Amino acid sequence: MNEIPEMENQSRRRPDPGSGKKALPLDPHFEFLVGTLTTTEPEGTTGWRALPFHLCCVVCDDSGKDNPKTLLEIAGSEPVKCKSDEIIFIPAGVSHRHSDISVSPPCSCLWIHFRMRILGSLDLMSFYDIPPVIGKNERIKQKMLDLVNLPENLDFFDSARQQLLGFDLVSELLRFGTRNRLLPSWRGNMERLMPVFQFIAAHPAERIPLSRLARKVNLSPSRFLALFHQIAGCSPGKFRENERFRQACALLQKGELKLSEIAEKLGYCDEFHFSRKFKQSSGINPKNYVTRFRMKHPAL
């Protein structure tokens, strides 16, 4: 007799299927910088490089031969021979080199440069360890092709599709990764520091004292600095530099401001100082950046 009421009580305690799970307002944004399908040069190499954005690429060969196509070298790791249709992922800042080792006719290489931002300048991918060679994956390859084949000038619907394709691509990549620094207290600390991330992103030209940032979240400077580094993986100063670089890229792509105006807007001393800092972050000066990325010239 008592079992039925107990079952009814349990059913009443079930969560409402119409209610969603509360998510942090992370403001995710997929940045597609450049991508294309190019023909590889026999025995060609990219040379050693460390890019300021993520690289995802795949060598495509229709010859049907399953022999290795490219040699991937990453600083501090053993070289890896990659076959056709194997997805390669290189995180931003990782020194690496690609060399063609195919014995068949020239192959084609599909590649994209991108970033996945949350809270302005935080890099979502940096919270995960993703293997450099993922293997064959048609879903990732198709998302890359779809991104590359979007029109040059994106309208409202193309822009929405680019974001959705980017989210799908990142979601697929993260399936192969493992979280590298999420602690039990991470969510609470993220929520607590969120106003600071948003404030820095909204005021990239300001040199904000550490004590002022700490006061915004009612923490001592030492405790604030420890939590900030735990969440962002860098100091507030480095976070600001990353944000200035991100906003500089966006302004250069729009092409509406002169270099001197961008320098002033982002708090650089002058155009020369801006160009020097930009080259330190990207490896190229702002004018070359516009040529290679805004005009979609293949990057070296």
Image (cartoon, rainbow, N blue to C red):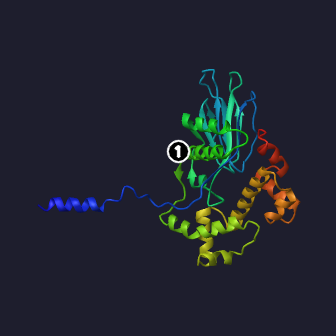
Q: Is residue 37 visible?
A: yes
**Exactly how many numbered labels are in the figure?**
1
Return the residue nearer the eye: 270 or 53: 270
- Quarter of the figure that contains the N terminus: bottom left
Q: Is residue 137 visible?
A: no
- For this orientation, the residue located farthest to the left is 1
Say which quarter of the image contains residue 102. Answer: top right
Where residue 252 sits in the image (x, y, percent)? Answer: 79, 52
The residue labelled by disc 1 is 176
Where residue 33 sits in the image (x, y, percent)? Answer: 71, 46
Where residue 162 sits in the image (x, y, percent)? Answer: 63, 44
- Quarter of the figure that contains the C terminus: top right
**Dot 1: element:** loop
Residue 295 lies, with reference to residue 10, above or below; the image says above
Residue 188 located left or right of residue 250: left
Residue 219 located left or right of residue 15: right
At a point 47% along the width and 64% down the height, the residue shown is 184
At a point 85% along the width and 60% down the height, the residue shown is 261
